[in-house]
Image (cartoon, rainbow, N blue to C red):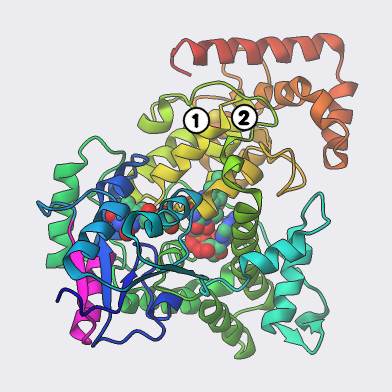
Amino acid sequence: MAGTIRNLVVVLGDQLSRNLTSLSGFDPARDLILMAEVMAEATYVRHHKQKIAFIFSAMRHFAEALKQDGFPVRYTCIDDPDNAGSFTGEVRRAVEACAPQRIIVTEPGEWRVLQEIEDWQRLTGLPVDILEDRRFLCSRSAFAAFARGRSRMTMEFFYRDMRKKTGLLMEGDLPVGGKWNFDIENRKPAAPDLLRPKRRTFAPDQMTRAVLETVERLFPQHFGSLSHFGFAVTGQEAEQVLDDFIRDHLPAFGATQDAMLTDDPFLDHALLSFYLNIGFLDPLSVSRAAERAYLEGHAPLNAVEGFIRQIIGWREYVRGVYWLKGPDYAHENFLDHRRPLPAFYWTGKTVMNCVSTVVRQTADLAYAHHIQRLMITGNFALLAGIDPHAVHEWYLEVYADAFEWVELPNVIGMSQFADGGFLGTKPYAASANYINRMSDYCTTCAYDPKKRTGEGACPFNALYWDFLARHEERLAANHRLAQPYATWNRMSPSDREEIRKQAAGFLSRLDSGKPV
Ligand code: FAD
Ligand code: DLZ
Ligand code: SF4
């Protein structure tokens, strides 16, 4: 084979799509695809076992399908004896073995890998083409143009531009239904619903079973359990998940989007982020499928608009912010939070039923929905002053859909307010009142959500007021916090002191590793 290869096309584990820019113009007679499972990617943070298994199995199935269709693929498994252990090592090995004339790759999803790829030319002596990732609807340069001259960003205006650009839910220049956003009709609490259709899971085939065995053997110390593994591992299976969602859940999507139920971790959420993020599903096709459901009268506008906003709005917006802000974004810490991540983020062993439930669910499923991530584990970390970088690493490890371009802005920007409000307009801080209204967690909790101080008082209450008080200088000017600050300032000095004492007592127990 030496000397006969024109292009070595490197396909990364989250680029499992035939429509990749790097594959356009691929000539099976002259080009070669390289895919590699490597230790460096599996361990740069200690990913959930299901996340590693999902990506490896999806990669193997994708490579197999390519081969069956006549594409030459050089594939390295994680336990191949010659595995060089990193993307760069595997590229160098392939260059030595196959002597290609050029390397082609679609831009990766994170700064760390981009910096690695930018060194390949020097290391191999070959030209390296890094092509735009057209799976996204807004390119990095288009987002930079949108951001130019803005000191703060607004997702809503970005989203409107994206609606106009894609034509989704548009009548000429105007939004269908006369409004851009129907959230006012969404976000209600939920009651258990035994009739809500169950989610499809996929029994592991032989290839997946081999991956599960390997992951258990090589990564025994990583977080989470493999026993509930049921992810789709092919593009066709992911399409089935999409069809199920559009048929069974989209009509109710908006209404219970913010609700949390102990025995129903999915409610009517899409469970599509995994497949969108690794390339099995295309965001525009998914959005068009939802739009069709509206046009055919199957799903109401509030649900469809809300869903499309998540995909062409939030998903694209956070990616734009990620690339705009640069690699240092991971180290922003506007509120100067320094506390280490408590051990119960790994074990679930805490009296706080909400946190315990979400952590245990995360260990079982490598999934939690948006409000569980934002208003339970994220909210607690924010109120307790946990180091945002540690929080970021936790989220990157524990969710099967976590890739830095999407995870980091959601954590640093939206959840921990560590960028000082660049991405969002206010910190998502909330007391037990919110959690009690939107979930059933408090009903079986040893803490009392109605109590602010004293024995058995829910920690979220004192921590919430203490958070506002601690950061008054930085946050009081934020007009979206005017009401909570007014309430805090109306409290008597002795009430305020008691609340702050309660918070200090809790934080000191937390710091000393005592059960909380
Ligand atoms: P649904 O709630 O049904 O939403 C539909 C789709 O919209 C999702 O599949 C996703 O593609 C998109 N979406 C919704 N909200 C967001 C958002 N805020 N940012 C980007 N896309 C969004 N999402 C990830 O894909 N990977 C992550 O690592 C990730 N980390 C997060 C960390 C925190 C602290 C928070 C608050 C949110 C995070 N999100 C992340 C966003 C969101 O929680 C998940 O996309 C969603 O829970 C995935 O489940 P779903 O497919 O059922 O989503
Ligand atoms: C997340 C991940 C893991 C765990 N393992 C691999 C791997 O072995 N090989 C691979 O090509 N990709 C893997 N990935 C995804 C990459 O980390 C991902 O491509 C980068 O985050 C860049 O977006
Ligand atoms: Fe969480 Fe407090 Fe409710 Fe317990 S009472 S579940 S700690 S919010």
Along the viewing direction, whichever of 148 and 221 lies nearer the viewer: 148
Percent of width and height locating residue 491: 86, 19
**Ligand 3 within 8 angstroms of badge 1 C-beta:** yes
Q: Is residue 74 magenta?
A: yes
Q: Amino acid at mark 2?
A: Pro
Question: In the image, ligand 2 is in what quadrant?
Answer: bottom left
Location of residue 319 (image quadrant): bottom right
Labelled disc at residue 445: 1
Percent of width and height locating residue 240: 36, 78
Proximity of marks 2 and 1: CB atoms separated by less than 8 Å = yes
**Ligand 3 within 8 angstroms of badge 2 C-beta:** yes
Q: Amino acid at mark 1?
A: Cys
Along the viewing direction, whichever of 77 and 300 lies nearer the viewer: 77
- Disc count in the image? 2
Residue 268 higher or lower than 44, as above or below: below
Say which residue appears at 43% left-offset and 52% top-offset: 113
